[in-house]
Image (cartoon, rainbow, N blue to C red):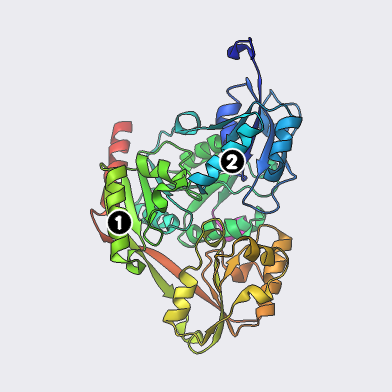
Amino acid sequence: MTTERDSDMTFNCIIMGAAGRDFHDFQTFFRRHSQFRVRAFTAAQIPDIECRSFPASLAGSDYDSDIPIYPESQLTKLIADLEIGFVFLAYSDLSHLEVMHKASLVQAAGASFALLGPKHTQLESSKPVLAITAVRTGAGKSPLSQAIAKHLSDQGQHVGVIRHPMPYGQLERQVVERFATHEDLDRFDCTIEEREEYEPYLELGLTIFAGVDYAQILRAAEQEADVIVWDGGNNDYSFIRPDLSIVVVDALRPGHETEYYPGETNLRAADVLVINKVGQAKPEAVAEIRRRLDATNATALVLTSDLEISVDTPDLVTGRRVLVIEDGPTLTHGGMGYGAGLLAARRCQAQQVIDPRDAAVGSIDRAFETFPHIGSVLPALGYSERQCAELETTINNAAPEVIIDASPARIDRVIHTTIPIVRVRYRFEQLSGDSIMAVVEKVVAAKQSASC
């Protein structure tokens, strides 16, 4: 047993992450609390992001060398080799069971396990902040975020959209990223996963910000914007303290709203709860969700919605052999077996939906092995040039007559193929409850009036 006072000690720490919240938590908490010395990051969920380092130039004066990033599989060895006292979990969309398995592994290795919360990590803004988050990846938060941002823009507000980070490349180049044109996506060497999030805003004529240092990102957005819209990633909570917290619940996954971290955190703190995809869900599932929401957060406003699916050229699909490409993260760690693309193929009466598993190569083939729940659809995975090439090979190996592209990334801009591509889009459509746009307008007006 140690006899030293904790306040006099320095604790060696590891941050478990996935190239997102881990870097934000470092910037907002660890740089201000030098007694917690970060010796390493670990990486999970996203391929090809380990074996990098967090640059000393971004780490502050307490660090004179880069902080290494290792695969999470090395965690137990790292705890011993680096004499780690604390391990902080800093990524999202993990079941509560998975979180406690990780906690048990850390404690069995002798270290303490910790989670940072909003008080220590959220930034403050002088502008109205609307945070759209979710209980699971793929619940439909981005279509709602886009609808809100477009509505406010149409009302004459200058909207700054800030997206949860996806810095999968060279971190020093990604400190503050501003996307206003499609050329900006190329300039920052955006992956397919980044394009999935940014493209829809650009098509709406909106500007979106992301990167590594969210204090700088927020300041940059505030210079241009009257209102800040936080478009969350996975089921993480907002990096910026919201004036209105809107949380999307997936009607196709009843029970998940209280079974995943930190989705339940969002649920309990929400001002508005949106039960999405109710048009595809069983009524008893929606009723079950309503009962659980009432028991968990009885004060939140509850409304229902669906995603309106549209197909650019449906005649190209009818009677043909098609390959369906869906949003990547929704299928992988989001746990969904299919998405809007498969629904569109059925609606347009495709002759056959080709199962891509026999055609898959490299990391795409391994993704099907890692996520066996995925159905006869292809996740749009492209975290690196090599993986984009493997995705392209998989598509061409499958030899469809038509590609159905339900990935917002615009697959036609990142792969080369002569196969016709049909785009599928989905748009937020409110079905019941108080108008979400009216609620948003009221909160924005109140904050702006108070600031005058």
Q: What is the x, y in percent for residue 426? A: 42, 67
Where residue 239 sits: x, y (%)?
Answer: 48, 39
Query: From this viewpoint, which residue is outermost toward the bottom?
Result: 319
Q: Position of residue 26 (x, y in %)?
A: 60, 32
- Of labels 1 and 2, earlier in sequence is 2
Question: How far apart are labels 1 and 2 at the CA level?
Answer: 30 Å
Query: Residue 365: within the magenta?
Result: no
Report the magenta stretch's main SS: helix
Who's the residue at 46% across and 53% down the image?
136
* Residue type for callout 2: Lys
Q: Going by the image, does 428 lie left or right of 335?
A: left
Which quarter shows the N terminus? Answer: top right
Q: Is residue 23 visible?
A: no
Asked if residue 20 lies left or right of residue 141, the reply is: right
Give the camera-side residue of 210 and 294: 294
Look at label 1 and name its amino acid. Glu
User: Which element is circle 2 on?
Assistant: helix
- Name the residue tied to disc 2: 102
Does the stretch in magenta take in 181? yes
Residue plotted at (50% across, 49% down): 233
Bin the neighbour count of mark 2 within 10 Å (Cα to Cα): few under 14, some 14-19, many 20 and up. some
Local crowd size for mark 1, using a 10 Å CA cut-off: few (<14), some (14–19), many (≥20)? some
Residue located beneath label 1 in the image: 288
Bounds of the magenta span? 180-184
> In which quadrant will I find the C terminus?
top left
Q: Nearer the viewer, residue 74 or 171?
A: 74
Image coordinates of residue 83 in percent, x first then y, are 72, 26
In the foreground, 129 or 40 = 40
Can you tell which quarter of the image residue 405 is in? bottom right
Q: Secondary structure at mark 1?
A: helix
Residue 288, visible in the rendered structure:
yes
